[in-house]
Structures are given as structure tokens and as C-alpha cells.
């Protein structure tokens, strides 16, 4: 903090009230401050804008706004017309803006700096759906913690993460940002990320305020089309889409973001049932809610508000405390209050939440606590961060198949051709949702492979094709490289710009030019390891599906090439499991493992007429949720499960897991149930627990899970949590469609 700023801050009314408040709880101090504020200043505290400084960083991942210049933004700060900015340009910008707030504004209320630190700040970790494949919430907590360590050092007090939207339709581009299709995994990852970002003390200079988003059901957009209509029942909302938000809130997340979409005709940004009934009354949420980007403005296009003033009134009265980007709140709230359309008490309640949050973040004690240019540099891309990125990368990789133990490859004695648009080049490594990371600092696949093998000269590279367009001469060169090699690594999939926000795809397949390349290379007869780059599940086919081995590597972040090489050459046995089902055909979307049986389920085996399946295609996954192979040979046996579970009782279900292979592995053992008969239809399987088990070669271990009726709850006919006596299937299995070992028990009343 500059000397001038320190002196001004020390003399400021806000500081004086804080000292006068002594140990009074924050509200009393805050109330005293609110009593001094004009209505314009109050509206200013509810106004967040993209940072004007930094050459478009602020709108790098959003539609560009013709926002103010940095000087105009400083003038806003001086007039108290701004609560903070997001996606700015680091500590120096924050220092400049905070100094104006502390030395020139009337009440010297500290600014809040926010950013989309989704999966890393300068050091980038795997995209969230990839990290969820680790089935290791503890890992997600560590990477979020490291992201906070770096981000908070850059002056960022608040991150717009975790995104906790359940995604059942892989056509939706933002599947990459969440934890996949399952509620339990979604809840556990949400908790982990909130704890990671916020740490143990929100006042610490390595803590950032977490923000659960996008509230709610953004992932239920019809046809996977981003921003599209959502029309789900209250029962589905409560059973599938809301639980991860509740989990994040219970983990202590103190901000939430309204989603762009409508639900059954009401845009979330003006949905008082969501923002007040659910969030405040049912869940007791004490934090504040921010609109998403221009979400308040978009209610005009939704045809839900006639103009900016009405959009402001609808959003604010519904319970959205703060407006992001549009500036509507500072433009229209004062007039709405003056005309009695917005009660002053409601305005004050929102201002109180925001100021209380600034106090919880320690900004009233020291507005510069996260602003230190030297610390920002010292904390960026440290060795522990890079090592963690490589660890997270390894653990996110899912091996779908490995015929004849093609993998792991030897580090010497084999000529390797890396073929495909993602074989080499500092692009498409970090993923589509990165504001501060730099692909140029990331490790590409060829670099990772070369670093791993004994003879770098044994590695050749041929791009073969573009991502979505052919490459002149590419296939010929690739075929020649394949013929000159002993094994091919096929580096194909999606580019960053094919995934993420506003990147819904009608066909979730490998682009045709890459398929042509794969087919040509396959004709050489060389063994092929397909290494997929993807932000969503893909419907694999042809030469890619017929490759000897397939690795799903998502967008792995800064250490992508090294992490992939660790698995390719056996320095790490793949342990990742699919957090989203890979379908047989893109036409099956939305497909999710915990679907209902319908009244005409197709029995095991051949397709039967007049049963619930597509023409010639079973309605099941090609690679199901929870699927993933290791370098071991794993067997499930000796299931033990009591025949009855007493109403107030608890049973232990166990099975023996054996690794008869020659390599140490980690196995993700999953517990599924099925409620056979209930007063509402129930899914064919529900994940209720999982355990990641390390098994040495030849080792066995008995895994036990506890089950009580609390885990058998569902949302009943009255849209309330319900559980009913009856028969249940229970599996301990390696995926949502694997038999594993199975038993039944009866819950007795
Ligand atoms: C974007 C996203 C949201 C993000 C916000 C700020 O449109 O929907 O996830 O946090 O705007 O960049």
C-alpha cells in the first residue's frame, strides 16, 4: 500500500468506524457505514464491471463490451460508482484502482477484484471435467488451493468458480467446466474446490472467495445448446441440478452466480423462487448473488423485461444482489428507490451483504492485502505448482482400451511417430477457459514424449491434418511417418475453441479431416495409440475406436505433454474414470448412466422389437460413466451384503478387489444401488460411494462401504426427500454398466 494510501485509509470514515466498532460484529460497523451512504453510492456497491485495463483480458472470454476506459473507470471509483472489477490485469492494476478508492473516494470503501480462475491462474491444471476423472476430490482441493495461492497474489479477492452444473448432454460446450453427469461426484468436487479456493481463513492473502455457478440448471439447456431453454420438473431440479450448489454452500461458499437460462419460463436472473425461496429460506444462504455477465440485460432479449429499468427491478427484487457488466444497477436503482418501487430496506440488505463480504475478506482491515506486485511474481508458476499440474494431469487421464497390453510403451527400442494436429505445438493444451495461463508456457505432447524416451531421434512428428480442415500433403506425410515407425501415437480430438462457452456441437465426434487421417494411418497396419484431446465425451468410431489403445486426455493444462508421457511409458498407471458417458452414437444425446428404465427396457443381449432403443443401436454407453482401465488385471469377488437393512440401521457391503497384474495400480471401486420399486420411478443405477484403492502387483484388499437409509433418499411425489421400504440392488463395480459383484437387500420399515 502506498504511503499516501495508508495515511488516507487510516483517516478514512470507514476505518474510523471499524476502530470505533471495536469488536462489534461486522454488521454493526457495516450498518454505521450504510447510514452514511447515498443511494448512488449504495447502487455503486452493487455494480461490478469488466476491468478496463489490460488489452481485453477482461472480455477475452466474453462478448466484448464497449466499456469505459481505465481513466473513466478510475473516475467511477472516485465517485463510489463501482464495487470492483473482474478479469483485470494483475496486482499493478489493482494497486492503482485501490489507491484511488482509498485516497479520493468519499467513504473509502475498498474495491473487490474478481476473475475467472477456473482451473489454475498462471499454472494451469486440467479442465475441471478432466480433474473430476481422477475421482480424487482431495486433488481438486489441492489444485484450487494452488490456484488461490497464485491468483490472490495477483490481487484477486474473488474467483468465479467452482462451476457446479451437472451436464447430461455432451453437445453442450461447458461440460468441460464442471464435474460431469453424476450428482455425488459433482457434490464432492464442489466441496473440494470451495475449500481449496477459500482455504481456512478468507482474510489470508492466499484465499479467494468462491462462487458457485451457474445457479441454476444451466447444464440442462435443451439439446445441449448453450443459453437455451431449460424446462425441467421441480423434482429433477431438486434431485439432479441443485444438490451440488447446496454442497458448495454447505462447504462455505459465500457467493453465487445466477445463470443465463430460464427455467420453465422464468430467467434465473429474475427467479425469486430460486434466489429467495430455495437459496435464502430453505438453504439459509448468507452470502451474495451476482448476475452472470449481462444476464440482467439479457432479460430484454428473453422477452421477460421491456427495458433496462424493468430488467433492473426484476433482477434486484428477485434477489440478485449485484449486477455484473451491464451497469444497470447504478443506472436505475436510485430512480427505482426514489419512486418507491424498490424499498430502501431491500437495497440496504444487499449492500450489507456485499460490505460484510469485503469485511470477511479483510479488505476493510487492509485493502491492499492481496495487492503486491513482487509477491504476484514470486508465487507464479513455482516448482510445486508445476509438479502439482503434472500430478493432476496424470490422474485425469482415462484409458478406455488397451488391447494386447499395447501400453505402456517401452522408452527405448521403438521408433515412434506422433501423428495428428495435436502432436506438436504450443496450442490447445490449457483448455478453453483460461484468462491468465499461457499455452506458450505449456508442454506439448511431442516435448513430453521426447523428454521421456532414451533416444529423441526415434521420435518423429507429422501433423497429418488440421483440426477441422485437411492439410495439403498431410496424410501422405503421415502415412510415410507411420510406415517408418514401429508404433503410432495418434494425437487427435477437439481444439480449445470447440469446447467451452458458446461452443455447443451438433455432432460430438472427431472432425472428419482427422478421421480421414486416422483411417489412412490405420491402413499401414502399425499399432496405434489414440490420444484424445477433448472437453466433452465423444462418440468414437472407425480407426480411432479400433486403435489398440485409447487415452482420454481432455485439456490437461501446463504439464499436459509430460503427464501424458508419464502414462504412455508406464511411469504412472492410468487410474482416471469417466465422469461422463461416452455414447455409441452422437444421436444418443442426452445420454447419462443414471437414466430411468422406462416401461420397455431392452433386456440384456440382442435388441428386441418395440423396446427402448434406437434402430440398430442399444441405448447404452460405448464407454460408461466410471469406466477406466489400468495397467493391472483387476478382479472383483466375494461380495458380502446382508439381506436386510433395518429402517434405522446401517449395513456394511464389502467385496474383495484383486490385482493379478505385474504393475502397481489404483482402482476406483464404485458402489451403486437401484431402488427396484418406488412411488416415483428410479434410475437403473445410482452411484452412492467410491474408493480409490492402491494395489501392488498380486495384492488383494477388501473394500467396505456403509449403507443406511439416508443414502437411499430420493425426491418423492411432494418434491420432498423421501425413502420407502423395499428391495434394492447393490453393486460394487468398476463402472456404471459393469456387473462387478451384485447382491440385493431389503430396507425394512
Ligand atoms: C461468462 C460466464 C461466467 C463467467 C462470467 C465472467 O459469460 O458465463 O461463467 O464467470 O461470464 O467472465
Image (spheres, rainbow, N blue to C red):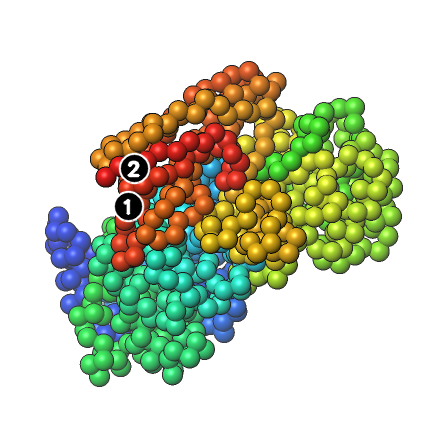
Instruction: Tell me, yes or no, if residue 535 can be seen here.
Output: no
Residue 713 image position (x, y, % from top left):
31, 45
Q: Which residue is mark 1?
A: 723
Depth check, front residue: 313 or 677? 677
Name the image quarter holding residue 685.
top left
Looking at the image, which residue is at 31% across and 75% down? 314
Q: Residue furthest front?
A: 609
Query: Measuring 23% from the left and 56% from the top, which residue is drawn there?
Result: 282
Task: Report crowding for label 1: few under 14, some 14 to 19, many 20 or more residues within 10 A (C-alpha).
Answer: some
Q: Secondary structure at mark 2?
A: strand
Judged left or right of residue 221, residue 710 is left
Q: Left or right: 621 with respect to 220?
A: right
For marks 2 and 1, give the CA distance: 9 Å
Residue occupying image coordinates x 61% and y 48%:
607
Q: Is 517 on the left-hand or right-hand side of 503?
A: right
Q: Are marks 2 and 1 in contact (CB under 8 Å)?
A: yes
Q: Residue at x 45, y 31 (%)?
A: 742
Mark 2 vs mark 1: which is more N-terminal? 1
Residue 116 visible in this rendered orientation of the protein: yes
Residue that numbered label 2 is attached to: 747
**Image position of 99 with respect to 207: above or below:** below
Q: Is residue 715 above or below residue 706?
A: below
Amino acid at each position: 500500500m502506498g504511503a499516501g494510501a495508508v495515511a488516507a485509509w487510516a483517516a478514512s470514515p470507514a476505518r474510523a468506524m471499524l476502530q470505533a466498532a471495536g469488536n462489534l460484529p461486522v454488521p454493526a460497523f457495516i450498518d454505521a457505514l450504510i447510514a452514511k451512504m447515498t443511494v448512488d453510492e449504495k447502487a455503486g456497491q452493487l455494480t461490478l464491471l469488466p476491468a478496463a485495463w489490460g488489452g481485453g483480458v477482461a472480455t477475452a472470454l466474453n462478448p466484448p463490451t464497449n466499456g469505459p476506459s481505465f481513466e473513466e473507470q478510475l473516475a467511477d471509483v472516485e465517485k463510489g460508482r463501482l464495487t470492483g472489477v473482474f478479469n483485470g490485469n494483475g496486482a499493478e492494476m489493482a494497486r492503482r484502482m485501490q489507491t484511488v478508492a482509498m485516497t479520493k473516494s468519499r467513504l473509502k470503501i475498498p474495491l473487490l477484484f474478481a476473475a475467472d480462475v477456473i482451473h489454475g491462474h498462471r499454472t494451469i491444471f486440467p479442465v475441471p471435467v478432466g480433474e473430476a476423472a481422477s475421482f480424487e476430490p482431495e486433488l481438486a482441493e489441492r489444485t484450487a488451493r494452488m490456484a488461490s495461492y497464485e491468483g490472490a497474489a495477483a490481487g484477486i479477492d474473488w474467483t468465479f468458480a467452482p462451476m457446479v452444473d451437472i451436464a447430461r448432454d455432451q453437445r453442450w460446450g461447458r461440460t468441460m467446466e464442471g464435474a460431469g453427469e453424476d450428482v455425488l461426484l459433482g457434490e464432492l468436487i464442489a466441496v473440494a474446490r470451495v475449500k481449496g479456493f477459500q482455504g481456512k481463513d478468507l482474510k489470508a492473502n492466499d484465499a479467494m472467495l468462491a462462487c458457485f455457478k451457474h445457479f441454476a440448471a444451466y447444464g440442462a439447456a435443451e439439446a445441449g445448446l448453450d443459453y437455451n431453454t431449460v424446462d425441467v420438473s421441480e423434482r429433477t431440479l431438486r434431485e439432479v441440478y441443485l444438490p451440488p450448489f447446496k454442497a458448495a454452500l454447505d462447504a462455505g461458499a459465500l457467493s453465487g452466480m445466477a445463470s443465463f437460462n430460464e427455467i420453465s419460463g422464468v430467467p434465473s436472473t429474475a427467479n425469486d423462487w430460486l434466489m429467495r425461496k430455495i437459496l435464502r429460506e430453505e438453504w439459509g444462504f448468507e452470502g451474495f448473488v451476482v448476475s452472470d455477465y449481462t444476464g440482467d440485460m439479457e432479460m430484454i432479449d428473453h422477452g421477460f423485461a421491456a427495458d433496462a429499468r424493468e430488467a433492473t427491478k426484476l433482477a434486484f427484487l428477485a434477489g440478485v444482489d449485484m449486477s455484473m457488466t451491464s451497469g444497470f444497477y447504478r443506472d436505475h436503482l436510485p430512480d427505482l428507490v426514489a419512486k418507491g418501487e424498490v424499498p430502501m430496506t431491500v437495497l440496504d440488505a444487499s449492500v450489507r451483504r456485499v460490505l460484510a463480504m469485503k469485511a470477511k475478506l479483510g479488505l476493510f482491515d487492509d485493502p491492499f492485502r492481496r495487492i503486491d506486485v513482487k509477491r504476484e511474481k514470486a508465487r507464479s508458476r513455482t516448482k510445486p505448482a508445476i509438479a502439482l499440474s503434472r500430478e493432476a494431469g496424470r490422474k485425469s487421464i482415462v484409458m478406455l482400451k488397451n488391447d494386447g497390453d499395447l501400453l505402456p510403451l517401452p522408452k527405448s527400442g521403438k521408433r515412434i511417430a506422433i501423428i495428428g494436429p495435436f502432436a506438436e505445438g504450443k496450442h490447445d493444451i490449457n483448455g478453453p477457459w483460461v484468462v491468465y495461463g499461457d499455452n506458450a508456457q505449456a508442454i506439448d505432447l511431442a516435448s513430453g514424449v521426447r523428454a521421456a524416451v532414451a533416444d529423441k531421434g526415434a521420435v518423429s512428428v507429422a501433423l497429418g491434418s488440421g483440426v477441422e480442415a485437411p492439410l495439403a500433403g498431410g496424410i501422405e506425410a503421415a502415412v510415410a511417418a507411420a510406415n517408418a515407425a514401429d508404433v503410432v501415437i495418434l494425437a487427435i480430438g477437439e481444439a480449445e475453441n470447440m469446447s467451452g462457452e458458446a461452443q455447443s456441437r451438433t455432432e460430438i465426434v472427431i472432425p472428419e479431416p482427422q478421421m480421414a487421417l486416422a483411417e489412412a494411418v490405420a491402413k499401414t497396419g502399425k499399432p496405434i495409440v489414440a490420444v484424445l484431446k477433448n472437453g466433452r465425451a465423444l462418440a468414437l468410431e472407425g480407426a480411432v475406436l479400433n486403435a489398440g489403445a485409447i487415452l482420454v486426455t481432455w485439456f490437461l493444462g501446463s504439464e499436459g505433454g509430460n503427464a501424458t508421457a508419464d502414462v504412455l511409458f508406464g511411469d504412472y498407471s492410468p487410474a482416471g474414470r469417466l465422469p461422463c458417458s461416452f455414447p455409441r452414437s452422437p444421436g444418443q444425446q442426452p445420454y447419462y448412466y443414471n437414466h430411468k428404465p422406462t416401461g420397455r427396457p431392452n433386456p440384456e443381449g440382442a435388441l428386441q422389437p418395440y423396446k427402448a432403443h434406437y434402430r440398430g443401436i442399444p441405448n447404452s454407453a460405448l464407454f460408461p460413466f466410471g469406466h477406466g482401465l489400468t495397467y493391472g488385471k483387476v478382479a472383483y469377488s466375494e461380495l458380502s451384503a446382508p439381506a436386510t437393512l433395518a429402517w434405522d440401521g446401517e449395513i456394511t457391503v464389502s467385496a474383495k478387489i484383486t490385482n493379478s497384474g505385474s504393475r502397481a495400480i489404483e482402482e476406483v471401486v464404485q458402489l451403486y444401488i437401484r431402488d427396484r420399486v418406488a412411488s416415483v420411478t428410479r434410475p437403473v443405477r445410482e452411484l452412492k460411494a467410491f474408493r480409490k484403492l492402491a494395489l501392488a502387483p498380486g495384492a488383494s484388499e477388501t473394500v467396505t462401504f456403509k449403507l443406511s437409509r439416508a443414502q437411499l433418499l430420493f425426491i418423492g411425489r411432494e418434491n420432498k426427500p423421501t425413502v420407502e421400504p423395499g428391495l434394492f440392488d447393490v453393486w460394487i463395480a468398476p463402472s456404471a454398466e459393469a456387473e462387478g459383484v451384485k447382491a440385493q437387500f431389503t430396507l425394512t420399515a
